[in-house]
Image (cartoon, coloured by chain):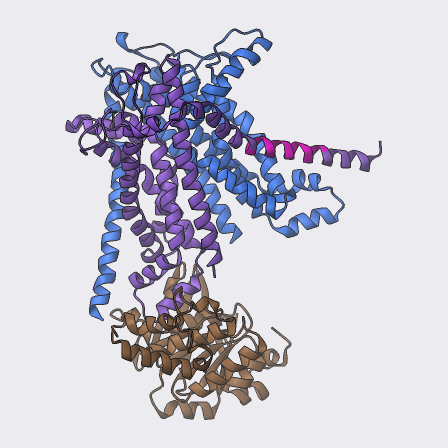
Chain colours: A blue, B purple, C brown
Amino acid sequence: MNWRLIKDKLAQRSFALLLILSIVVIFLILVGLVTKSVPLLKAESLLKILSGSVWSPMKGDFGFLPFIMGTVWVTMISLVIAVPLCILASVYLVEYASETLRRMVLPLMNVLAAIPPVLYGVWGVLFVVPILGNYVSPLFAVDTTGYTVFAGGIVLAVMIFPIMISIMVEVLQTIPHELKSASLSLGATKWETITKVILIKAKPGLIAAIVLGVSRAFGETIAVLMVCGNIPQLPKSLFDAGYPLPALIANNFGEMMSIPLYDSALMFAALLLFVLILGFNLISRIILNRLEEKAQ
Amino acid sequence: MSNVKKRLLKEKLAKGAMQLSGMLITGCLFFIVGTILYKGLPYLSWEMISQTPQGGFYIGKDGGIFNAILGSLYLASVSTALATLIGVPISIYVHMYVKSGSFLERACKLLFDVLFGIPSIVYGAIAFSIMVWMGIRASLLGGIITITLLTIPIVVRTIDELLKTLPIDLKHVTFSLGSTRWETAKMFLRYIRPGIFTAVLLAFGRAIGDVAGVLLTTGFSDNLPKYIDEPAATLPLAIFFQLSSPIPEVQGRAYASALVLTFIILTIVICTHILASKQQKHKI
Amino acid sequence: MHAYPSIQTAEAQDLTALSTPHIQIKDLNVIIEGKRILKDINLSVPNNSITSIIGPSGCGKTTLLKTLNRLVDDTKGVEVSGSVLVNGEDIYAKDAEVTHIRKKMGLLSQKPFPLPMSIFDNIAYGPRIHGERDKKVLKHIVETQLRNVGLWEEVKDRLDASATRLSIGQQQRLCLARGLAVKPEIILGDESTSALDPLSTQTIENLLIELKKDYTIVLVTHILRQARRVSDYILFVYNGEAVEFGRTEDILLNPQNEITRQYVKGFIS
């Protein structure tokens, strides 16, 4: 009898220890990132780092704007493509599709989510880049190899499809049936019910799904790196090459560590990513948790 | 056109647009797998998957990517095992020992939700600078630690979702037989056993496919992974490196390597799916 | 809101005063997330009889049941004050040991929850965790308890089969047997027949009536007819207060309190 209670307590203590350890690790990551970024922040003002557009570490210029803009461009492009498609598709799945179709499509989304980034990258190189370079860009009278922010955006859009669809479907399924019947019985068509009732009601959840998609897009490294050119410049159009933040870290870490402040600058890039993604995740999770509580 | 007709037309158009976007999205999947299959199959050979790189492999001479396949399997299995050993107790703790609805419970769940979204490049960068600081070079061990950190939140979240589906009455029933919380937890683990396998497979898939985390921490090697403190090759990195080569033969091998990775991932997904449907059958 | 004075009929008082009652509730208050769910409950549950707790849904009757074996601890934001004495020991005392308390009380929940194992292991689960390892003893316990609930003849050839394969009525009887196997003194039933068909309901009810010679039984039910069929005593709970307690026929036919009268006549529900 006593032994059982001891076992219980033992389990409790050791599990708690694991939890505390993992929380400590996260905390250490944050502390590590900050301390490593301090040298750069001491050398230059935060404002100058964030708004400077010249990146030449050899001369001591660490302007992050090209990378920030690179990330913003690819993320925006991917959202413009993915958001409408995902909303339409998930509404279709919840409101129109038969149970069998839904059961077939949702697992496929899991497959899409399970495909590793590098394979998306390979697909981007094999398919998206040549199409953009050889067929699409001539239509706009631009000359490009196809390694552009546009290519990065398209690959990213496909990568964030699964997470957005699965959350949007979940959100739409929490909308009470009565609400739909009420609108339909007033003589509204299904589409009118969707735009005027369901989407309005589902708005916070949909926004949360989008924000999660954004944070996924922000952090995606390898697939984007493979297709978007990696030139530290401010992209001005869809067909310019860009250089997103994660790619900066991946491409340069470990090399050229002898240049003063270089590793500090890369750590600052990691810190920037960490903080942004933490923020985005926090917002969307809080919204989603609240919705879930309401649904119960 | 009458008002009603106009509205019905709108309905039809909207439905068409929705069907189209649904097809586009699901089409992407087949498209990606198809492209890799089409490009990779001609280059796939037994030699590719059974040999290590020979001299001049990276300019198109003999050899294969066995080192990378083995390295990836090794890295992913050890990391997943560690992540399971750490992650399952954490979710049990949060579910069983922490008072439900308390601040601690909410904070923990939120924390792991958020960690789930932190990109692997951040983990990789941190692990790399810690390794530099401690004087450890890029090695299998470094990769294992990084990937374990990356997969813990995946395990915790999936198990938590599973535990949430168990009715509260079940907890009460086992409690009322005089079980301690630990005994009840063991019972719960029994209930969700197929689900745990799913979580593990999911984490494994994520671990084996990750590049950004291993890029900085694991390095690359043409030898089979023998020692944990030596650099090791991984499949995604092999794809990445070979693809950036200008030599067509090497690029072709990148496609074939991508095909091998696709095959591994699809196997995992199919296993997960079978297990998940089993889980549903036993549902109460 | 005014308080309803708890009325006990003279006979009931006599009866509970006879011996130490199994369960004695004193000044029990339960607050959940700032809302007072139970207010100043005082009650002595008579031994070896069936007491039904009745009342409209949301009145706190299930919470009351769950305070008896401290399952209420598991609720979000709960505060309990007052005391519940089982065999004279306060289960809310600081040094009280929860698993030990719960072992004394078998719970029959709304829906049957067979554990994911064989029929045999379901019943052996409780004795096993409490330290019984001897196979012969376990076999004996399983057979006795299955006979107790009249399930032995139906399942004796397939004790190794999964418990989930039984019909829902059989499952509920299995759960009752499983609860009895840890040798409780008290059986708590939380609308235990609400998921069952009429025939299974009748079986369970008859079982409970039979079991009361060895156990003290407390049932929560929202079906008045069931309370009439099985219980010796009835507690009427309304708005978190114990309004009236007494013999079944007194409460149903001759309630002292106006609200009780309205409830049993079906004016409020």
Q: Is residue C243 visible?
A: yes
Picture quarter containing residue C214? Answer: bottom left
Is residue B25 covered in magenta?
yes
The single residue placed furthest to the front in the displayed view is B46
State the residue at coordinates (31%, 71%): C92
* Depth order, front residue of A68/A123: A123
Tally of numbered tags? 0
Q: Is residue A19 magenta?
A: no
Residue drawn 45% across the image and 54% down it: B279
In this view, the residue in front, B38 or C59, is: B38
Instruction: Choose between C141 and B182: the one closer to the eye.
Output: C141
Tell me where residue A201 appears, x and y as whole percent.
60, 43
Asked if residue A136 is positioned above or below residue C126 in the image, the reply reads above
Is C89 displayed left or right of A211 in the figure?
left
Q: Is residue C186 above or below residue B143?
A: below
Query: Where does residue B185 sit, x and y in percent of width and height?
Result: 33, 59
Q: Quadrant of the C terminus of chain C?
A: bottom right
- Boundaries of the magenta span: B13-26
Figure check: A25 above or below A73: below
Residue A34 is at least partly visible in this image: no
C253 left or right, relative to C40: right
Q: Position of residue B158 (x, y in %)?
A: 40, 47
* Dominant secondary structure (helix, strand or loop) of the stretch shown in magenta: helix
Q: Quadrant of residue C144?
A: bottom left
Q: Residue A31 location in percent, x, y?
A: 25, 32
Quadrant position of residue A244 = top left
Q: Residue at x 36, y 54 (%)?
A: B95
What residue occupies the far left of the structure in this picture? B135
